[in-house]
Image (cartoon, rainbow, N blue to C red):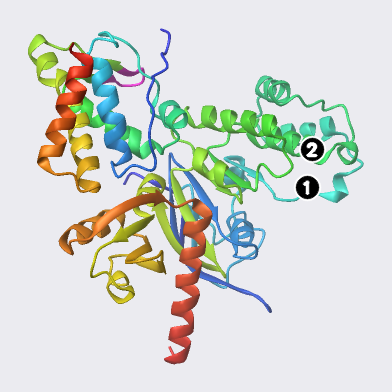
Amino acid sequence: MKVILLPIQINDQSAEPLYHQIEVQLRALIVSGQLTEGTLLPSIRELAQTVKCSVITVKRVYNDLEAEGLLRTRQGTGTYVAKVGELERDRHRLSAVIEALDQAVIAGKRVQCTENELETMFKEVMNKYYE
Amino acid sequence: MVETNAIQFTGVVQNRSKFRLGPLNMSIPKGFITAIVGPNGCGKSSSFSLMLDLAKPDEGLIELLGQRLEQGPSVDLKKRIGYLPEESLSHENNMKAAAKAEFYQFWYESWDVNRYRELLHLLEVDDNQLLGKMSKGMRRKFEFALTLAHGPELLLLDEPSSGLDPLAWKTMINILHRYMDQGDRTILLTSHIIEEVKRLADFIVFMDRGMVLGMYEKDELFSSWFTLFVTGPDLSEKLAATMPGQCGVDHAGGTTYRITTSKAAEAEQWCAREGLQLVSRQALELDEIMSALLLQNSLSTRLNEKRGI
């Protein structure tokens, strides 16, 4: 089976722990259906090499996502994308969005935005994309 | 018991007229890549000599792949190890590369001639040459191929990439990653090249003046060391110095300070508690972390000397 390349990018200047950055992106790829059931993921060492982190971090990501039921590991053959139910898909669908909003608010607080300012900005961005 | 350490140093001391190594205590985990970094003369290569039983420790115990070195390693143990020394051996200058390969083949039953050929091909090395006639990089690539061709469980690489051009370097990194993909294998390497450590290592060991300063998981290390620009109306140099993990404070103008910390997460919580604004954050590079650790080490050594410890 062909191993795919994962479009995962990390930001090593971010306060977000590395494993979390990778986890959020990989979860989004699975839940959005971009990675379909049965897809063979890169080995832990391969993924660590592409995103330039240690195997310990990747191992943690794979373990977490396996515990969530998004991945399954078959001894000796590798890690695969598991079947994602409708319910789970819905539950996870919004997690990346909430994550991004979180980051936006943190960035705002860092430069001392007021709640009103943030709301105004949020509406402006909404208008830009939902016209 | 499951043996999880490929290498174990327990209270190892080696006294020489001008250098004392140790006491060294370190455990190199099996299945991972560990990089030793440190300034010249920190004891990296001496530790390798001890592991290979080329020199004996005055005190302490060394275990390799679950076997004690006390009585000298058996030939069988050495067959499970691949060692790439820092310097090539000048007495081999008049030897043809292929002849050295034959010598290796004689000693290692697990020698895989196809693997050897494949490595030479990947690294673009012709072994029909005198070792002394090869360029430094070419000879390095050849020695590297030799180290791997018998499929060792443990690789000891002393400055593996010295003399390699960027393309050969990349090939070497890829070969090492593929080597690790086969499971229960371990690499211990020394390196001065930051990018190499970043790309390869899972764990980083810092050494200085014959001592281990600490061993860290790579991602944890890089996510804990940050330089923070912090500002606040009441922020003073004195307050800035109380930040958790503080390793240096610089005045950045006004009431803004640049503070280096080894505990970024705690430091940010501290800023929030103290009502301070975080203006920006920047991750430290490996060399910056190393100099901060060395500085701490030399300060505490001097302090202990003063106290007569």
Whether residue B7 is visible: no
Q: Is residue A78 magenta?
A: yes
Q: Is A127 left, or right, of B208 in this rendering?
A: left
The residue located at (64%, 65%) in the rendering is B41
* In contact (CB < 8 Å): disc 2 and disc 1: yes
The residue located at (25%, 8%) in the rendering is A37
The amino acid type of the residue labelled 2 equals Arg
The amino acid type of the residue labelled 1 equals Ser
Q: Is residue B262 above or below residue B79?
A: below
Q: Position of residue A59 (x, y in %)?
A: 32, 33
Q: Earlier in the sequence, mark 2 or mark 1?
A: 1
Residue bearing the label numbered 1: B88
Q: Position of residue B283 (x, y in %)?
A: 41, 49
Q: CA distance from mark 2 to mark 1?
A: 8 Å
Circle 2 chain: B
Crowding around mark 2 (Cα neighbors within 10 Å: few <14, some 14 to 19, many 20+) is: many
Q: Nearer the viewer, residue A6 or B113?
A: A6
**Circle number at residue B175:** none
Circle 1 chain: B
Q: Nearer the viewer, residue A73 or B65?
A: A73
Q: Nearer the viewer, residue B238 or B109?
A: B238
Q: Nearer the viewer, residue B286 or B55?
A: B286
Q: Is residue B30 above or below residue B47?
A: above
**Residues in magenta, as a range:** A73-79
**Circle number at residue B139:** 2
Q: Is B219 left, or right, of B150 in this rendering?
A: left
Q: Position of residue B188 (x, y in %)?
A: 53, 47
Q: Is residue B177 magenta?
A: no
Whether residue B281 is visible: yes
Tag 2 secondary structure: helix
Q: Is residue A119 above or below residue A85?
A: below
